[in-house]
Each structure stands twice: as C-alpha cells, then as structure tokens.
Amino acid sequence: MSHAHRVFARILEREQPGVTFTQEGSSLRSTNGKRYFAKLGSPSDRDQFIGEAESLKAMHLAAPGLVPKLLDCGIIDEESKERDSDVGRPFFLSEYKDIGSLSGTAAKVLGKRIATELHAYKSTNGFGFHVPTYCGATRQDNGWFETWPECFDALIGGLVDKLKARGGYESLCEQANEVRKRVIPELLGPLVIQPVLLHGDLWSGNTGIDRSTQQPVIFDPSSYFGHNEADLAIGRMFGGIPESFYATYHDYLPKSEPQDQYGLRQELYQLYHYLNHTVLFGGAYASSARSKMDKLLSAVRTG
C-alpha cells in the first residue's frame, strides 16, 4: 500500500473500528466492500482542497448523486500522521465512482439534472462563493457581489492581475480591461437573473457516467453562484460535451433574455477559460483569447 493510502487507512480505521482497508488501484477498499477515493496534498494545497470540498458539499445538496459524495476533508494531525512530515498536509476523501465516458443518452439526463437541480439551487448571499475555489490550478478569489456584472468582472480581473504579474502579456491585459469596461456592462448589465450554483469547470473531461448505474456524474468542480449560462460555455471547448446535453438543458431552462445575445454571452464566458488557460499553460492560448476579445469588442462597437 502506498504511503498516502496508508495515511487514509489510519484515518478511516480510527473512524470505523474493526474495519480494515486495502489499496485497489487508485482507491481504497474496506472489508465491508466500500471503495473510497483519497488524495493527500502539500501544505500549500490547503485552500484548493477546501474549495473542492465545499463545492462538492454544495453540489450534493443541490443534486444528490450527481457528484461524488464528500466524506471528509481536513489537515493531517499528530494522531493520524504516518510520518512527521505528514503533519499539516491536507487530505480529501470521497466515495469512489468508477467513471466512464459520457454517452449521448446520459448527456440528456445530465442536461435535465443540471437545469432542474443544480441550476435551480439559488444563493441567498448574492453572486460568488464563501471560499476561494480553483479552476484548474488557478485560484478564483471569490467573495460576494450584489450583481452578476460585478462578480464576473472580478473573476476576469483576477486573471488579468495574474497575467500582469507574470509579465509579457501587456497588450492582452489592455484588451481584457477594455472588455471589462465595455463588453461586460453591455452584455451582462441587461440580464435579470438570480445567482445559481455552478460547477465552474464543466468541460467534457469533468463529466462521465457511473459505470455501476450508467447515470451521469460530474466532478473536479470550481463552484460559485453565478449566471447559469456561464456553466455551459466551456463544454463546447476542448473536446465538447454532446449536443444532446444542450438541447435537453434548454428544454428545461430557456436561454436568458435577451436571447439574441446568447451567442455573444457564450463567447464572453469562453473568454474566461481561454484567459485562464493562458495563465496555466502560457501563450499558446493567448491568440484564442485575443480572437474572442476582437469579436466581442467589434460586436459591442457595432451593436
């Protein structure tokens, strides 16, 4: 058994006296047949682990069974350590799901569940989230905002600040700030919406089916409360979620008014992810971000 899995076995055995655990691939299996997904981070990963845990907790309340159920998240202490160097490291424990590729049929079910459950779960505190969440490795400095334009501007602004700190992206940052100044108020200002719970990183690689039930499952969230359409944009990027997902989704939750700006709003929400990928992976994605911004700025100028 690996070191990390031995640590989790100690934690679980402390909570379940008399039950023993063995490693099975990337999971732990107990003598009573249950399987667990476990990961152990470095001390610097603490906020990222908490963000994922809080996202899963909220999503499980909104749509039970659609995400792996969080079982525990915390910090290794003296009692649960296996080595002295373990103390202070964050741990994450959830139910294990054997995940396969999302089928067209399951995509329809997913579209309905997200529209009628996840995106029906509303915030009472405004737009944002109560802890920072991470889109990939990028920290989203979530807070609470009264309006969606303020919230989305802050999310884009956080990426601009990260690119400025890295250096070499001055013109990209200038263009992004022009989008913040002109496009965000133009496209998001007219919306009359309520803040609903988002997955935050709903691309094809974070969706699948539970092989034991053939039901859809989503994972690796970076949640916050925002405009429901912001959750749809990245699914058309990087491989793509089946189109049956979108058709079914909008059967239950129509496009926001003004509907004729839906396509431009999707471009704007995709821009967030292209800028984030520039932060994560460098300049290969900068040209895609520039192309999006050229289109958005031109549309606002001529609209």
Image (tube, rainbow, N blue to C red):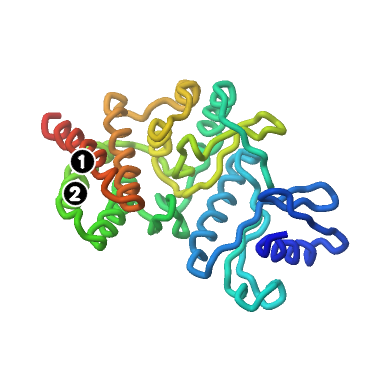
Which residue appears at 72% of the width and 64% of the height?
6
> Would residue 147 be seen by someone viewing this image from the given angle?
no
**Residue type at tag 2:** Leu
**Residue on which disc 2 sits:** 172
Q: Residues within 10 Å of mark 1 (few under 14, many from 20)?
A: some
In space, the residues marked 2 and 1 are separated at their CA atoms by 7 Å
Which residue appears at 39% of the width and 40% of the height?
227
Q: Nearer the viewer, residue 41 or 194?
A: 41
CB of mark 2 within 8 Å of CB of mark 1? yes
Give the side of residue 7 with respect to residue 255, left or right. Answer: right
Q: Secondary structure at mark 1?
A: helix
Furthest-front residue in this view: 1
Give the side of residue 229 with respect to residue 212, left or right. Answer: left
Quadrant containing the C terminus is top left
How far from the left and from the top, in percent, is residue 78?
68, 78
How far from the left and from the top, in percent, is residue 108?
55, 23
Q: Residue 9 is drawn in which quadrant?
A: bottom right
Q: Nearer the viewer, residue 184 or 295?
A: 295
How far from the left and from the top, in percent, is residue 296?
20, 35
Furthest-left residue in this view: 302
Q: Residue 168 is drawn in which quadrant?
A: bottom left
Quadrant containing the N terminus is bottom right
Q: Which mark is residue 290?
A: 1
How far from the left and from the top, in percent, is residue 202?
46, 39
Q: Earlier in the sequence, mark 2 or mark 1?
A: 2
**Residue type at tag 1:** Arg
Identify whether 180 is placed above or below 16.
above
Q: Secondary structure at mark 2?
A: helix
